Structures are given as structure tokens and as C-alpha cells.
Amino acid sequence: MHRLAHATFGALLSCTFLSGLYAADELKSGTPELKHAGALAFAPDGVLLVGDSLSASVFAIATSDGSSTEKANVNIEGINQKIAAMVGSSVDDTTINDMAVNPMSGNVYLSVSRGRGPDATPILFKADAKGNLSEVSLKDVKFAKASFENAPESGQDRRGQNPRMSAITDIQYQDGKVIVAGLSNEEFASKLRVFNYPFDGQESSTSIEVYHGAHGALETRSPVRTFITYENTVLAAYTCTPLVTIPVGDLNGEKVRGKTIAELGNRNTPLDMIVYKKGDEDYLLMANTARGVMKLKLDKPEFDAAKSIDSRVADKAGVPYETISDFENVVQLDKLNEQHAVLLVTNASNLDLKTVALP
């Protein structure tokens, strides 16, 4: 649902950039056969990462979308209606699954389903700073594919949902790795998978266990809904809404228990998150279904020292946050540049793409 991770680039920035160029050169020409276009993120050099839960794969697709000086004011009202008209579908049968900003160009990419269920047609779109909206052609592009074997079977669970669609719930790139959150078909179903990038067939699949204070129980079957990396730590959020830290170095194929540093409110699903800097401070901004957009100050030593929540809580506990009242009905967000974010906002039956100042 995201973006190049904040991570500790520092002195590694130049070699990470070079590895991104090498990765783009490693991609082979062809037509990626997407079955579903879900979670999005960007690797270096404008390479778009697309999560395909149905094929249990992550595609890395070269966009040929280079640097630009126009990295602000991406605004399109009723973007869902415009996309529906372009693909010859109704708004009700057109779903925007995710959004990511190419940090090189500032262009916004959207993953879309035309139709419903596993037979829906996957399509990618691009929106630019001039308000132009175009379908991204997948014919004869440079791409690579990484797949995994233990995805859930398609079907219907006790809540009437298809667990296969949660095989990939979010993606991040960090320092030559692609981290993928989602479910497996194993007893400890919640996974964080790590692929080398460029894809070389190497994968580790780590089972994640967390204590959920609102439920008063350890959970291993609930997937991470959205996450980001910060200073070599995964910040992961789950439904109802525990916020958990997991060291990136622990994602080595073993079972790991995350540290629950906050319960941010039940009856809520986190949707998307970004990390940004304001002044000398780093912040996390997280959109939710029922709890608005939350802003948390990122303090790694404080997070490391925070007491782990390991008993039932009534509703909220742990590290503090504030709700950004100016940001309402946000379903996706990504950082556009150091001063602005792009939001996908519900407005009656419309979805609007908006550029706003970071709070």
C-alpha cells in the first residue's frame, strides 16, 4: 500500500540506488499474467511491485517512469467513476485495491479490479500531476516474478470471506529485500515473507504471533493488514487495532512473537500507513476504517523501551497518538514528497484523489 520504506538508508543510499539500477536491468521482457492486482509498492528505479494473491506471487514491473519536477498537486475528483468509464464497467463493479506513489516521478499508481470475486480483471492505472489518467500497459514490459507455495486455498471461511485474497495484504521494499505480509495455509497462518531483490528464488517465510489486547489472546491466524519499516523494525497493524513491532533481522524463517506496543481501538481495520519527517521528528500516519487518521510520533528508543501489552485491555492502551481531524474518510495514503501526501478519499459515491500538506 506503499512506498520506499523510510529505513536507515543513510550511508547505504548510494549502493541501494545502484542495486535498484541493477535490479531493473535484470528484468526480462514479456507480458506478466496478473490474476489479481492488489497491494502496491515501489522498489528503486521506478519498479512497481504488485501483489497477486490469486497466483501467490509478487510481480516487479518496470514503469519507465523517470524523474520529474512536478511532484505535487495530484488531484482527480471522482477517480473511480473515471476509471469505470475507461474500462467500460459500472462504479459498483470497479474496485480500487491500492495506491502507491512512484518516488522518482510523483505519479500515482492504482491497482484496480474490474468485476467481483476471483474472476475480476486486474488493471493498473497511472495518474499524473496534470490530472491525466491512463491505463498501464502490461504488454511487452520488463518484469520479474517471485512466487510462494503455501498460500491459502480459495473458498469461503466462517465469515464468508475468501482467505486466498489475504495471501498478500501489504508489501514493502527495504535495502535489497521485498517484505510481503499475508496468510499461509499452515496452522500458524500469519506470515511475513522476505524475498531477495532482484528475485533469485530465495525466500524466507516467518510465522508471526502477536498478543491482541482487545481480544485478550495470542493470535497466529490474523494477517498484518498494513505495515512499514522504520529503522530496521517492522511496524505492523492488525484489525481491532494492535500496533506491533518486529525486528527485520528476526524475519529468518522461524516463528516470531511481535511486541504489541499499542492497542489503538477495536472495531476498526487499519488501511494504510506512511512514515515522514516534520522538522527534526519522524511520524507515522495511519488511515483506518473507523478511527480516522492517526498520527504517532516515532521514537525508536521509546518503542524499544515500551512495555509489551500482554493482558486484555478495554479499548486503548500503549504509545499515544492523535487523530487528524482534517483528514476524513481516507481509504489510502502515500507520501508524495517531504511536504505532501496523496490521499484517496471517499466522498459520497465518489473516490477523490487529493494532494494535501503533511500534518
Image (cartoon, grey):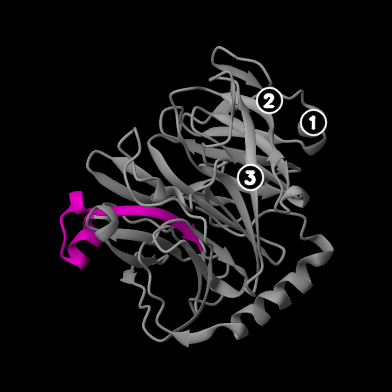
Q: Which residue type does callout 3 highlight?
A: Ser
Residue at the location (64% across, 26% down)?
A: 262
Q: Which residue in the rendered view is the most extreme toward the top?
A: 314
First in sequence: mark 3 vs mark 2? 3
First in sequence: mark 2 vs mark 1? 1
Residue 334 position, x and y percent, is 51, 52
CB-based contact (under 8 Å), mark 2 and mark 1: yes
Please state the extent of the stretch shown in magenta in the rendering: 81-101
Above or below: residue 17 compared with residue 346: below
Residue at the location (51% across, 36% down)?
A: 222
Q: Is residue 267 visible?
A: yes
Q: Is residue 154 left or right of residue 338?
A: left
Q: Which residue is mark 1?
A: 302
Q: Which residue type does callout 1 highlight?
A: Glu
Q: Which residue is mark 2?
A: 319
- Quadrant where the C terminus lies? top right
Dot 1 surroundings within 10 Å: few (below 14), some, or many (20 or more)? few
Above or below: residue 199 compared with residue 36: below
Asked if residue 89 is among those painted magenta in the image, a careful observer would answer: yes
Residue at the location (49% across, 27% down)?
A: 240
Give residue 207's mark: 3
